[in-house]
Image (cartoon, rainbow, N blue to C red):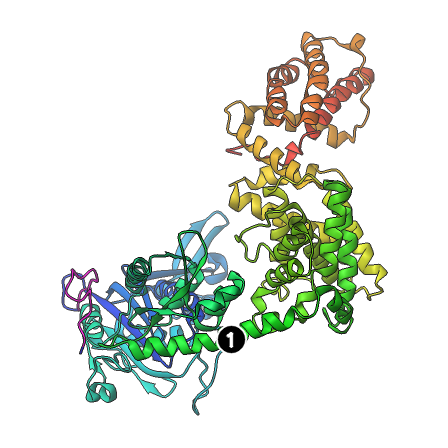
Amino acid sequence: MIKSPIASGPDSHSAGKRPGTKTGQAELLLEIGTEELPSQFLPPALRALGDSAERLLKEHRLPHGAVRTFGSPRRMVLAVESVSGRQAATVKEVMGPSKAAAYDAAGQPTRAAIGFAGSQGVTVGGLEIRRTPKGEYVFAVRRETGGSAVAVLGEILPDLIGGLSFPKSMRWNETGMRFARPIRWLLTLYGGRVVGIQLGGIRASNRTFGHRFLGSPESAHSQGLPVKDLRMYMKTLERHGVIPDQSTRRVMILAQLTDLTKAARGHLHRDEDLLEQAIYSVEYPHAILGEFEPHYLSLPKEVLMTAMKEHQGYFSLMGPDGALLPKFIAVTNMKLSNMRLIREGNERVLAARLADAKFFFEEDRKTKLADRVEKLKGVTFHHKLGTLHQKIGRLTELVVKLADMLGDQELRDTCRRAAQLSKADLLTGMVGEFPTLQGIIGGEYARHDGASEEVSRAIAEQYLPRSMDGDLPQTLPGKILSLADRLDTIAAFFHVGVVPTGSEDPFALRRHATALVRIIVESKLCLNLAGVLAQAKMLVIQDGFTAVGQHAADLLDFIVERLRYYGRTVHGLRDDVIQGVIKFRGSGVFDMVDLLNRMKALQAIAVLPEFDPLMVGFKRAHRLVEKEKWSRDSIDPSLFQHPTEEHLYRVLEEFKKRVPALIAQGDYAKALDGLVRMRPAIDGFFEGVMVNADDPALRANRLSLLYAIDQLFLSFADFSQIVVQGT
């Protein structure tokens, strides 16, 4: 057996209370033992396990304490503190027929009362008569004390386990049960006693199993390790080579990475995805430092790092100058007195991968990217959308349009050349072996072929950001190429009717649209996206693809929804503020930078105490204008009868000049401040005059005054969408 580095430290895990205590509460412990689970399956499955457990316990009226989940490649664990020994009592009340229908004149129950009582499982004598707003009605009242926790858990635990879903599931025996991997054992304890369930041909017990190779005697491998609570479970597994808690494994791995990095005199390339993969790939982490031949450093750094990460799950090390060191760190699932054989085995496997990468790199460069473009005519982009060669043609025209909006002739030429070469690396051996290098290796090959640095970097950056919150392209040509690629993809799929629905989005169109928003907004690219989208749709139509459905009008709305999501999640904008600005946008114009700036300015002023009273006055004016369908703005000052009319007119004339000028300058804070300063005049007007005067001329003049105010406000946003707090 081995001694865990944390086994002797303070135990943070509560064992819970057993039946027989004053509270009648006890700890629930569930372990699902399996064949090795893929590392990427575990985090979402553990979240689902905890969430589903809380939901089921609540639905079945079992009060409980904290819910925790743990996981490693061979086990998923649920621990719930202080689960009540019995279901909470409940009273269910159901209203039935009226008293008049339930009882006759003599006060005897009718068939309606008898039938209602029978359907609710109560006696007729147990029906209660209560007064309601609709009159007197009979009620069936059922009081349930609740069953024992053991009985309830015996019913819900199989549902909890069977309800877990995975990206891929399998059947492994005649029971037909589906799970990510075959289930080999079940541990179900409530208050130290086994909850008797059976699932997938496995009967639950109080036994767990340690590491396949570390610390367990032969008998423990076959018979398992008995435990009675979470505290004992953790200590037993730690003694037998398993660290069940992923947060503890994280701490151990990070400490080992730090120590080995110092020993190598380098800097660790921190990769959170790779770290999570390591955490969920081992039960007892032990990191080792390995080396590879320095001559492989002639390969681009990205190639080496990808080979180490994608195929082997190794961490890369950098020197003080940022250059890659000929060393790596592997996190293994073993701790032996002599790790030399394991280290050498890892080095041999990596050497073979790097040799393959070097071969592909050298072979690929014998053919120029430009010479591969013609062959893209034989590569399908999508069966409804032709070839990659056709896509390149559309990209080339889109980048030119974007470059014309954002730069000069030199930018146009750079973007056109980058677009023409952008997909050629998909035919290289390197991308065939390492698909995540697409674009990156294309930039390397373009540079080798003599392309300018601007063209090479644009090709390398075309797929950025690669995730929802990933790094953005840094160069303007790279941003333009990335935008054009995503615009074409979205427009093309919408044209042929491949549109995201609900949770279904097989071609990640939502992610592409979110990337569009991020690139444009965070790079402050002021362009009319509506015009670019129109050209993107036109180019797809010109390629002759068959339209399916009427999705063209939905395309801009689809991107608007991504802007709405971005504003809400990144900037914390209110939904009504976003809606007000979105509804304002003029037809044929869609400048996301401008719209987001308006949203932020509007939200900033919406928190002022005078803003809500201003909205009350504005909405009153807006409703009158809208109700009358008024669209005349001719105001005759000679018809004013009350000083408040004259005052509002002077204020309006002042701000009709000032506010539009401030909006044109992009000084939205001052423009909104001007609108807020109109509040006293608007309130005074409504207090001083009756808009719907008997005299038609007076009424028309006052409506025109309100119409002018309405139009001034709507020049910034649709303020009718703003929710006045407290209403």
Instruction: Tell me where residue 222 appears, x and y as whole percent.
Output: 25, 89
Residue closest to the eye, 421 or 178: 421
Residue occupying the far bottom of the picture: 174
Secondary structure that dominates the magenta span? loop
Whether residue 7 appears in magenta in the rendering, the answer is yes
Residue 513 higher or lower than 505, as above or below: above
Residue occupying the far front of the picture: 295
> What type is the residue that disc 1 sits on?
Ala
Which span is picked out in magenta? 2-18
Residue 151 higher or lower than 443, as above or below: below
| Residue 501 visible in this rendered orientation of the protein | no
Q: Quadrant of residue 140?
A: bottom left
Instruction: Tell me where residue 70 appears, x and y as whole percent.
Output: 32, 67
- Residue neighbourhood size for the residue with mark 1, other residues' Cα within 10 Å, grouped as few (<14), some (14–19), many (≥20): few
Whether residue 205 appears in magenta in the rendering, the answer is no
Q: Is residue 637 left or right of residue 8?
A: right
Tell me the residue that label 1 is attached to: 355
Residue 272 higher or lower than 702, as above or below: below
| Residue 279 visible in this rendered orientation of the protein | yes
Q: Secondary structure at mark 1?
A: helix
Residue closest to the eye, 134 or 699: 699
Q: What residue do we see at 77% from left, 45% from top?
A: 531
Instruction: Tell me where residue 565 appears, x and y as whole percent.
Output: 57, 48
Q: Is residue 290 left or right of residue 694?
A: left
Residue closest to the eye, 220 or 619: 220
Residue closest to the eye, 415 or 384: 415
